[in-house]
Image (tube, helix red, strand yellow):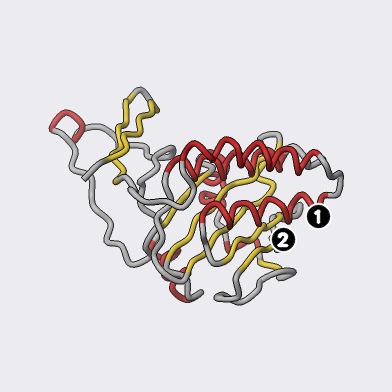
Amino acid sequence: TNYLVLVHRHAGKLIVEFERSIEMWKTPLEQLYARSTEFVTALQATDETRVAQDLAVREIRELTGFDRVLLYQFDEDLHGTTVAESGNDRLPSYLGLRFPADDIPAQARELYRLNRVRLIADATYSPVPLIPSSEMSAESPLDLTYSVLRSVSPVHLEYMRNMGTAASMSISVVNRGRLWGLIACHHCESRAVPFAVRTACDFIAQILSLQIE
């Protein structure tokens, strides 16, 4: 098995993660840059916010192959509204629906702001505990805020199953340090997305954030 090694430093510690590589993917790595460039060109050709939002969700769905991609926008009270959607009719449409702020707790919102891309490839996964070394046992728990492979709340996994989604990915739209919204991707079956494709989706979301006044 081949692995992609992801490394970051946080709180004085070097954190190394080993993510299983995905051998086959419909978008070769060398095409990601070209697609991203085409998206930026299309975005620059419009000054309409709704058109830009539709372009973003459609491009992310084409890149990732998810059944449904939604763009949520948060209002001043942190309630969310689905303002754009791209789907293949395997999952119901959520376009125009509103969601209460309590759906995303404050701690989760802050994680979305700091760690912009989160993938849950299979909602039925079993979390694996970290085993600290003898030196780390006496220290505070390892801070995995910026980790790619960190687990998620069991409540969120149950929420996914209730929605009929076996896999999901979220990309934060951050504008001037503020969590403006979320791009949420859902799939009926488990679905892994390579790190390079996730990075391209993050790029799309941040380019979209520049369109926000």
Q: Position of residue 141 (x, y in %)?
A: 30, 39
* Callout 2 secondary element: strand
Taking the view exactly as shown, the residue that stands out farthest to the right is 47
Disc 2 packing (10 Å; few <14; some 14–19; many ≥20): many
Decide which of tag 2 and tag 1 comes sooner along the chain: 1
Type of the residue with mark 1:
Arg
**Between residues 125 and 53, which one lies in front from this camera angle?**
53
Q: Residue at x 61, y 54 (%)?
A: 183
Mark 2 to mark 1: distance in Å?
8 Å
Q: Which mark is residue 84?
A: 2
Q: Residue at x 46, y 39 (%)?
A: 29
Whether residues under marks 2 and 1 lie with C-beta atoms below 8 angstroms apart, the answer is: yes
For the C terminus, give its image quadrant.
top right
Taking the view exactly as shown, the residue that stands out farthest to the top is 12
For the N terminus, give its image quadrant.
top left
**Between residues 209 and 159, which one lies in front from this camera angle?**
209
**Between residues 22 and 84, which one lies in front from this camera angle?**
22
Type of the residue with mark 2:
Ala
Q: Residue at x 32, y 45 (%)?
A: 21
Residue 174, by quadrant, is: top right
Please state if 70 lies on the left or on the right of 25 as rendered. right
Q: From what the image shows, is residue 69 above or below residue 35?
A: below
Q: Residue at x 48, y 75 (%)?
A: 164
Taking the view exactly as shown, the residue that stands out farthest to the left is 134
Q: From what the image shows, is residue 207 above or below residue 92?
A: above
Q: Which residue is mark 1?
A: 50
Q: Position of residue 48 (x, y in %)?
A: 86, 49
Q: Position of residue 204 (x, y in %)?
A: 63, 42
Please state if 67 lies on the left or on the right of 154 as rendered. right
Please state if 141 lies on the left or on the right of 197 as rendered. left
